[in-house]
Amino acid sequence: MNRWVYLFSEGSKEQKDLLGGKGANLAEMTKLGLPVPTGFTVTTEACLYYLNHGDQLTDELKTQVMTAIEQLSAKTGKKFGDLKNPLLVSVRSGSKFSMPGMMDTVLNLGLNDQTVAALASNSQNERFAYDCYRRLLQMFGNVVMGLDNSTFEGRITALKKVNGLSFDNELTADHWKQIVSEYKELYRKNLQREFPQDPIEQLYLAIEAVFGSWNNARAKTYRRLHGISDDLGTAVNIQEMVFGNFGETSGTGVVFSRNPSLGDPGLFGEYLINAQGEDVVAGVRTPKPIQVLAEDMPEQFNQLKAICENLETHYQDMQDVEFTIEREKLFILQTRSGKRTSKAALTILLDFFKEGIISEDTLVSRIEGKDLEAALHPNFAETALKNRVSFLSGLAASPGAATGAAYFSADAATEAKARGERVVLVREETSPEDIEGIAVSEAVITSRGGMTSHAAVVARGMGICSVVGCERLIVMEEENQATVADETIEEGTILSVDGSSGKVYFGEIPMEEVGHTVALDELHTIWDRHADIKVRANAETPNDIETGMALGAVGIGLARTEHMFFEKTRLLQFRRLILADSLAERLAVLKELKTVQKQDFKYMYQAAGGKPTTIRLLDPPLHEFLPRNAEECREVAKELGKTFNEVKRKTDNLAEVNPMLGFRGLRLGVAYPEIYQMQAEAIIEAACEVTEEQEFSIQPEIMIPFTIDAGEFAHVRQAIEEAIQNNLRDNQRTLDYQIGTMIEIPRACFVADQIAQHADFFSFGTNDLTQMALGLSRDDSPRIVTQYLEAGIFEDDPFQVLDKAGVGALMKLAIEGGRKVNPQLKIGICGEAAAHPKSIDFLNELGIDYISCSPFRIPQAKMTLAKATVEIVGG
């Protein structure tokens, strides 16, 4: 025999799978001795059986329901259909996960033409009784019989209009009797049947309706949007009715144990006097703030406050509580974990920890990445998004939300910003020349590129929201417009960009109110106590470094020196360097650049406050810096004092079929050692001067990129060492420093034991290592990756989540090889994939020292590392 029914006194909060969230919590509150109206739960298993066997209640289930009804009658002294003391019940849904308003409820079940008279007599309140009866007719007609609720409401509206009344509570007993009569006529007219007078028939039909509501359209949509399985089913909770519409000493309301928007402690909610639960949310009457209850009914308010505090401590979570007061007696109808904003979620967890409600481990394990991310970035108001449809989508490259006018070039964006406009930069793809345009923009959209493209990396570093790889977007930069299917984006078109979802909308969307900040300093202290792997920042500008430090970085793991040349005047100098025709010309440019670079490095060290700082020497795929067409060649020639032919010839000579695999990184150091020597000298001089000027000492970490061979690395290191030692000797200084390499090519992983004989540290560049290991261009990957994800070939985008089987195996091989030669070899990982929560468990196994990511991903990376450690210890 299957057991389909449990009394509230028989369940517990651990049985959400079986009893649903509402039923499990009603059972738990009953065990706690709280004033819960007595009742029972029909299980989720009964629902699934019903839905999978022809939508029919079995005789076995009916028998168990009737046995429970008899037990309910024995406890309450009331009986179904009794003409002296009738039993009335509510029938409510309740799945494992809260789905507010998605499924169905019927109140006052058990009333009919005879029992309504008994209720009127017992209550000495005829108006109350017929109000309850019309509510049953209305809810039963809508929920069980499928009649349009507006049909019922229209009758009430018409009656109030005829009588010159504004509110339902102004209607008299005779008015409600008239409504009851009209409602019953609606049954006859629309359904060709009478309203069922038998309470047992009412009960069975209501149970079937609640079971069926599991598959209504709105419930299915809610589950899809919130990632809830369709295979859970809903329980049905049948509970003795208590009445908030019993007069001026009765009422009903909903209250949160803390403010769901800000997280502040104290009750937050509203209530209505002389009303039933649906009145609070129906908008027919304006509820009062819950604090007014302290004046209207101080005893009941204090009791409610104490119960909410008790429930909060018991469940270790902020609670959403429904209550009813019947003739000054308080009843608790439901409790569940309250929905809250991301900022409120973090505030509440921290307060719980400080108040001793949860442990530090629990705090760490319960912080959600989505809450942390949303708390750090502006977001569109959820209510405003409900009725908006995006016209364009791409990869959610950098989180946050922003609205601005579309512009199609960096110059146009900069000019618009100077006029006081908010700007959205729209490009086919961005390049170093666009850096100023990106910097002034609220958001960046590109039609090409992936999660590690220039636009994505730079936007993340700046904390600017970005959507990239919008394949349907055709950008015509020369015409200053773009198209998406039959839609055209002209210059100045207002766009709203959601970098967290990858969606773009026409027009302005209101932002959520930002009035609360997250106590990140407190969280960082806690996370640092738990995580073995440290988190550094990918940053090179003082602003980025300061942001990284403010967001919890323990140092700089990757400062990309080529990014320091994106600004216009510096870009010109860098072009002068790479277009130089002789060593003498090159050395003259390097002398000027050394002064600039040294100042850059001093700012970096000062912003980092003495924390470890890894500076990567130049790694420019030259195509990013060269003129791209004849017009640009003419401009560059004019600026550099060269002829067009000279610039064009040099540009053509340096052009490569595949520049990402061409003349870049350490290969630059082999061909032009003077460039790396200049950078090394600037790094050392800056470190010495900051050490002398500040109270902290600097130990530079110089990183050589794109190594494939131990001999190659040793050759370049020797040239750098000579320049450093000569510089220190000439200036009569001493300084500790390290020289390491970035492991980003598969061959380097195989010969890591050889490279480690010459390197002081390794830092894995997961972006390049991924594209070379998979033979997949990171800029052109979105189309291919999307197809692989849809086909189930890939579980995740390998540029966002570390490819453990391939790239991870290469990293493991390199670490084992390197530490075999040098057990103290410091290991870091620089790449966005390393900061993804799905990558963290694997990284813990590798025994690395730190990961490095863009500043705004640091908190989530630290949170995930700490959470993984807590789960390992606790698991």
Image: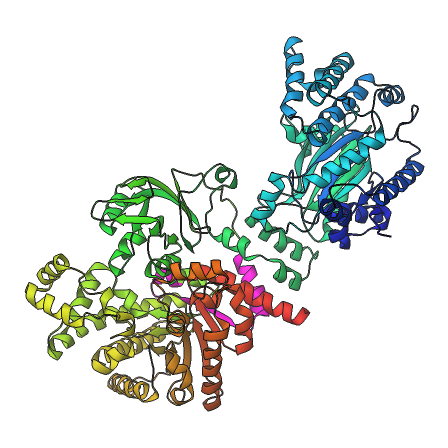
Q: Residue 367 appears at what percent x and percent y?
A: 59, 57
160 lies above or below 199:
above
Q: Quadrant of the C terminus?
A: bottom right
- Camera-side residue: 453 or 215? 215
Total numbered badges shown on the rendered structure: 0
Q: Residue 223 appears at what percent x and percent y?
A: 61, 47
Image position of 759 (left or right of 345): left
Q: Is residue 299 magenta?
A: no
Q: Residue 229 appears at what percent x and percent y?
A: 63, 52
Asked which colour scheme the image uses, the reply is rainbow
Instruction: Tell me the magenta residue range.
Output: 519-545
Image position of 523 (left or right of 287): left
Q: Quadrant of residue 74?
A: top right
- Camera-side residue: 244 or 472? 472
Q: Residue furthest front?
A: 54
The residue sitting at 72% across, 36% down in the picture is 209
Q: Residue 201 appears at what percent x and percent y?
A: 82, 31
Could you tell me if residue 437 is visible in this image?
yes
Image position of 727 (left or right of 583): right
Could you tell me if residue 241 is visible in this image?
no
558 lies above or below 514:
below
259 lies above or below 315:
above
Image position of 25 (left or right of 561): right
Q: Quadrant of residue 59?
A: top right
Q: Is residue 529 magenta?
A: yes
684 lies above or below 308:
below
